């Protein structure tokens, strides 16, 4: 009874919270002026036509002329039944838009995540094992550099160096190359590099501090005293 | 550089090294004379855009960028070529009764794809009557086809458009410009009055019906990264060699790729490395790109102006009592305060032309023979001409404004007049322009100006548009939020003095559209301008003109009046700076560049 009831309560609570969030989001979206309507009004006025009529027409087109409760119900039912509707900015179903974008997102986000999870802790532990050496300073410097420099700026700089000056990589991303091909690896290298340097900083620092804390722990000392051939950092990890 | 639209800021002939080589209107004959060598077909034309497009549905698109992308695969009824010549594409428009009834003769070699058969006049008439003129479809061309305009099929390949009143510049209004859409594609939606279905129709969105109606055929639209097109070997304009001999085997690229590259540095990098054949070049990098062997920068005149708008409504001029902006002499004084030549050379780096009235100087409607006062240059620039006019203006108002010994304009309380000037946040050129105006006003008019950045949408909502008064019915007029009523009665939520946030289109092909900006009771008068000249009569005469010559005379008079009345600070027409791969043959430095895009080719 105990655990089941706990799970039921948590799930129910999660449903309520998501409903509240969905409702607030709808409220904010509804309260904000609609840019498409504004644009239609401005255009009509500048064309010497009646802006009020243009406003009504655009509101009817976007179905904003329906009563608020109808729009709210429509929105909520749509969200929970995965009827996410039609994307006005892409003119395709929202679910298709997500699916097609996912194909490209996966290509850089998977290597990015793997590399971040691998490199961050390794560099951090290495730093901890070689505290205050030039290697530690170099690793720390690199971590802070990646953390501090904005990705969009770093990306442009690398693009100018490797794309424009050295011409090693293409400037414009080619969507038509096969996912598993040398061309794709080449064109994804810089984006992934920028993302990884931007995100390993925090992980690396946490790993370094955590490892440093255990570098002098009793069990590490004991291991060393027993003549363990491994370095302290491995044990600390 | 292949020439320039007037790097000295005026497009008159001067000794400047960057002066106009040809004519911005492109008076040269559009067709190359003599025997023309037909280029080989091959390769890819690569282009970039700065943002993805929302839709490629020709019936619902409202964006210029998407219009270009649709245009690669689907021509419209006609276009304009050098010298403002109407170039018939799908149909030829003509009138023989002074512009009331227009006859469109449809070409007979037009074929839809996807099994929809030949294009006939019926397709156009059905589109107008059942879709554009319907109440349910809400297409983007709806406003072009009010119910008073009647469209009638008069033959298999001919239809007539009858206007409620004659308009000699009807083609120039772009109103009769139609896309060809198959009747059979539209019919199910018309029967059901299904606007949503029409907007989301796959064949319309992916341009699957275009047959031989465009130079290229859309192969793929990848929503966030761009479009791929292939050559249309049956392009109908191949028969239009009377217009341009190069159409004979057009188009000349096997494929056309348009890619979305949102970062400007990347677009420019791609232009430099040859990955794209086109990218817009910012003013500060024109020289650098033009010096590259593989790039040529074209300066293409634009009809969009840069204006400093004065708020003549009740909540404008917050430096003291009354509203000095309402005084014509005061506005003329402010017109003398800003050195337009220096503005063009300093802020726009010479890649703009000075503006004196509501038309660019290269427009055929520019009052060339009349005496347009050139405020902001020569004798009409400097402290003396500014302050003498402002003194005349303040003598004319009931409040005690005056100049002190240091040339500062004081309000009745004895403090220097200080006003605000808004510009769009994040727009560097606009900010520089605002700061330059502030500096010039301080120096020449003795008015202190605070320069404030604001988001364009916020300015539009809270400052530019007025709140419609509750007693709107009792007002002399109330025409929506851009002119909610007379300037003493309707104001925006927040007070403001001046703005450079909005540049406006001067429509050099159809100057009649300017009426909306210069009538006190029009649909667009956020600044509360009341002409001191008889605008109503002149616009009425212009709208009823029976010949081009008559219209020209009236428009000249109007534009001289506008220049004299200084409804706003008319400052400059920036040129568009287009970088093309040097081996692309086709671009030209006139307003109509691109009209013959299917005939562009890569030189060997």
Image (cartoon, coloured by chain):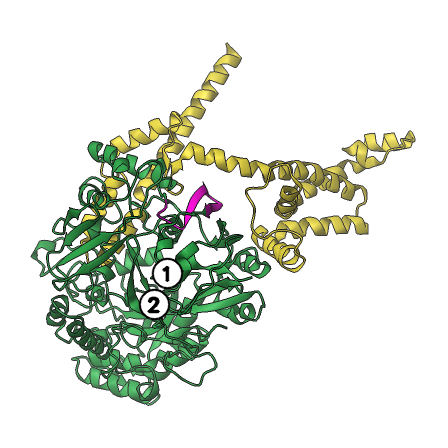
Chain colours: A yellow, B green
Locate residue A55 relative to residue B503 in the image: left or right. Answer: left
Q: Residue at x 42, y 47 (%)?
A: B232
Instruction: Determine contact: label 1, label 2, CB under 8 Å.
Output: yes
Report if residue B466 is visible in the image.
no
Q: Quadrant of residue B536?
A: bottom left
Q: Residues within 10 Å of mark 1 (few under 14, many from 20)?
A: some
Is A22 on the left-hand or right-hand side of B528?
right
- In this picture, which residue range is highlighted in magenta? B212-230
Q: Tag 1, which chain? A: B
* Residue A23 is inside the magenta segment: no
Q: Residue furthest top?
A: A1
- Name the residue carrying label 1: B595
In the image, is residue B546 above or below residue A190? below
Residue B485, by quadrant, is bottom left
Residue B390 higher or lower than A23, as above or below? below
| Residue B222 part of the magenta segment | yes
Q: Residue furthest right?
A: A227
> Mark 2 belongs to which subunit?
B
How far apart are the alpha carbons under marks 1 and 2? 8 Å
Q: Quadrant of the C terminus of chain B?
A: bottom right
Q: Could you say where residue B578 lies in the image, as x and y percent from the top left?
A: 46, 64
Residue at left offset 57%, top offset 65%: B294
- Numbered circle sitting on residue B82: 2
Q: In this orientation, which residue lies closer to the viewer: B394 or B66?
A: B66
Element type where label 1 sits in the image: loop
Q: Is residue B11 above or below residue A117?
A: below
Pick whichever of labels 1 and 2 is earlier in the sequence. 2
């Amino acid at each position: 009874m105990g655990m089941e009831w706990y799970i039921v309560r948590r799930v129910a609570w999660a449903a309520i919270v998501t409903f509240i969030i969905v409702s607030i989001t709808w409220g904010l979206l509804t309260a904000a002026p609609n840019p498409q309507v504004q644009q239609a009004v401005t255009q009509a006025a500048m064309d010497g036509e009646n802006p009020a009529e243009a406003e009504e027409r655009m509101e009817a087109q976007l179905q904003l002329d329906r009563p608020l409760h109808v729009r709210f119900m429509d929105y909520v039912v749509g969200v929970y039944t995965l009827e996410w509707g039609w994307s006005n900015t892409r003119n395709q179903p929202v679910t298709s838009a997500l699916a097609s974008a996912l194909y490209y997102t996966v290509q850089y986000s998977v290597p990015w995540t793997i590399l971040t999870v691998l490199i961050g802790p390794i560099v951090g532990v290495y730093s901890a094992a070689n505290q205050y050496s030039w290697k530690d300073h170099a690793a720390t410097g690199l971590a802070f550099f990646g953390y501090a420099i904005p990705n969009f700026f770093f990306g442009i700089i690398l693009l100018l160096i490797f794309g424009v000056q050295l011409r090693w990589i293409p400037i414009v991303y080619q969507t038509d190359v096969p996912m598993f091909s040398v061309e794709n690896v080449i064109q994804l290298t810089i984006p992934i590099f920028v993302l990884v340097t931007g995100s390993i900083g925090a992980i690396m620092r946490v790993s370094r501090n955590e490892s440093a804390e255990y570098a002098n722990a009793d069990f590490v000392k004991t291991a060393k005293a027993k003549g363990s051939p491994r370095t302290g950092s491995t044990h600390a990890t | 550089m292949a020439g320039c639209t007037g790097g000295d800021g005026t497009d008159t002939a001067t000794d400047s090294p960057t002066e106009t080589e040809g004519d911005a209107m492109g008076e040269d004959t559009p067709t190359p004379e003599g025997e023309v060598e037909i280029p080989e077909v091959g390769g890819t034309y690569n282009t970039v855009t700065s943002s993805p497009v929302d839709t490629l549905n020709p019936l619902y698109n409202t964006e210029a960028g998407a219009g270009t992308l649709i245009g690669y695969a689907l021509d419209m009824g006609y276009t304009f070529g050098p010298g403002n010549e109407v170039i018939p594409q799908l149909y030829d428009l003509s009138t023989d009764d002074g512009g009331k009834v227009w006859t469109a003769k449809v070409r007979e070699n037009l074929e839809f794809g996807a099994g929809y058969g030949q294009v006939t006049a019926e397709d156009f008439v059905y589109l107008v009557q059942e879709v554009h003129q319907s109440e349910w479809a809400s297409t983007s061309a709806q406003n072009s086809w009010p119910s008073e305009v009647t469209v009638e099929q008069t033959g298999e390949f001919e239809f007539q458009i009858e206007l409620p009143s004659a308009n000699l510049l009807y083609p120039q209004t772009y109103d009769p410009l139609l896309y060809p859409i198959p009747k059979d594609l539209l019919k199910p939606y018309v029967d059901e009055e299904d606007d949503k279905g029409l907007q989301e129709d796959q064949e319309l969105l992916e341009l699957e019906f275009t047959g031989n109606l465009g130079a290229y055929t859309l192969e793929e639209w990848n929503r966030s990264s761009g479009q791929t097109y292939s050559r249309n070997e049956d392009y109908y304009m191949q028969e239009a060699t009377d217009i341009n001999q190069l159409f004979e085997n057009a188009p000349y690229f096997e494929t056309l790729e348009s890619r979305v590259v949102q970062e400007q540095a990347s677009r420019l990098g791609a232009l430099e490395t040859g990955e794209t054949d086109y990218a817009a070049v910012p003013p500060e990098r024109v020289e650098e790109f033009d010096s590259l062997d593989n790039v040529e920068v074209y300066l293409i005149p634009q009809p969009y102006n840069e204006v400093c708008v004065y708020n003549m409504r009740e909540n404008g001029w917050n430096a003291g009592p009354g509203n000095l902006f309402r005084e014509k002499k005061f506005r003329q004084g402010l017109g003398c305060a800003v050195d337009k030549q220096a503005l063009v050379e300093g802020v726009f780096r010479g890649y703009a032309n000075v503006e004196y009235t509501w038309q660019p100087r290269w427009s055929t409607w520019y009052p060339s023979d009349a005496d347009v006062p050139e405020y902001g240059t020569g004798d009409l620039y400097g402290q003396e001409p500014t302050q003498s006019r402002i003194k005349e203006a303040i003598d004319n108002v009931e409040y005690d404004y005056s100049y002190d010994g240091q040339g500062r304009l004081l309000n009745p309380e004895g403090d220097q007049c200080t006003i605000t000037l808004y510009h769009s946040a994040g727009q560097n050129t606009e900010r520089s322009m605002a700061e330059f105006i502030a500096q010039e006003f301080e120096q020449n008019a003795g008015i202190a100006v605070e320069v404030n950045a604001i988001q364009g949408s916020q300015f539009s909502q809270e400052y530019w548009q007025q709140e419609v008064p509750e007693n709107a019915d009792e007002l002399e007029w109330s025409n929506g939020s851009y002119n909610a009523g007379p300037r003493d009665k309707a104001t925006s939520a927040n007070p403001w003095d001046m703005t450079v946030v909005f540049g406006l289109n001067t429509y050099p092909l159809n100057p009649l559209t300017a009426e909306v900006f210069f009538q006190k009771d029009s649909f667009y008068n956020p600044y509360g301008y009341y002409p001191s000249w008889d605008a109503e009569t002149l616009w009425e005469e212009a709208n009823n003109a029976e010949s081009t010559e008559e219209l020209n005379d009236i428009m000249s008079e109007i534009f001289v009046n506008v220049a004299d009345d200084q409804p706003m600070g008319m400052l400059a027409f920036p040129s568009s700076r287009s970088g093309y791969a040097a081996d692309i043959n086709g671009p030209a430095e006139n307003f109509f560049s691109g009209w013959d895009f299917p005939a562009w080719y890569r030189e060997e």
